[in-house]
Amino acid sequence: MVDTVEISRINLRDTLSVDIAVWMNDPDDWDFRPSLHYSGSTFTIRCAISGKDMASVELDNEQDEALQRDRVAELRVKFQVRGMHGRLKDIHPIIADGKAKKLATANWKTTQSVEFEG
């Protein structure tokens, strides 16, 4: 299950691009099904299964125009798991090249239609 969803950045590229961090409860969780909604000037990411709001943000006029024109948004998702990701307190160097190990994160990119309300 999804623990939390955080919208970290919104950019205008070819379409509206939304960077989000999705925190999962367990590394074996695969259940993330977002649906995108827009009402007034509020862009909302909801769970497609339960309909629960997971994250929302207010868009400015330029972002609003791009969303109204394209009717789609690009989601750039970074999946993380509570207890596995975060700040490393102890850096374990790789002796061969002198760099610290990093925890693997899964990234996902998709373009989805936006449902307009009101």
Image (spheres, rainbow, N blue to C red):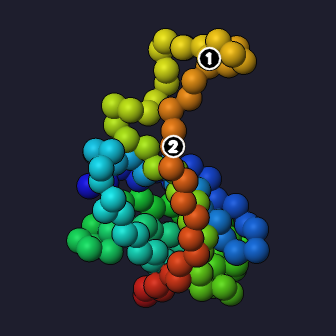
Kind of residue indicated by mark 2: Thr
Q: Please name which of the two marks, 1 or 2, marks the residue nearer to the observer.
A: 1
Task: Give the image location of residue 20, x and y in percent.
Answer: 52, 54
Tell me the quarter of the image containing the N terminus.
bottom left
Q: Which label was assigned to residue 105?
A: 2
Left or right, residue 4 beside residue 62: left
84 relative to 10, above or below: above
Quadrant of image for the C terminus = bottom left
Closer to the camera, 64 or 51? 51
Can residue 53 be seen at all in this image of the molecule? no
Give whichever of discs 1 and 2 has the lower sequence position. 1
Question: Mark number for residue 3?
Answer: none
In the rendered view, would you say 81 is above or below 31? above
Left or right, residue 95 beside residue 24: right
Confirm or deny contact between disc 1 and disc 2 (CB under 8 A): no
Answer with left or right where residue 106 lies relative to residue 25.
right
Which amino acid lies under the numbered mark 1 shown in the image of this protein?
Ile
Reading the image, the residue beneath label 1 is 94
Give me the residue at 70% from left, 75% from top. 15
Viewer-side residue, 91 vs 38: 91
Using the image as rendered, state which of residue 31 and residue 39 is in the foreground. Answer: 31
Q: Residues within 10 Å of mark 2 (few under 14, many from 20)?
A: few
Mark 1 Cα shell of 10 Å, populated few (<14), some (14-19), many (≥20): few
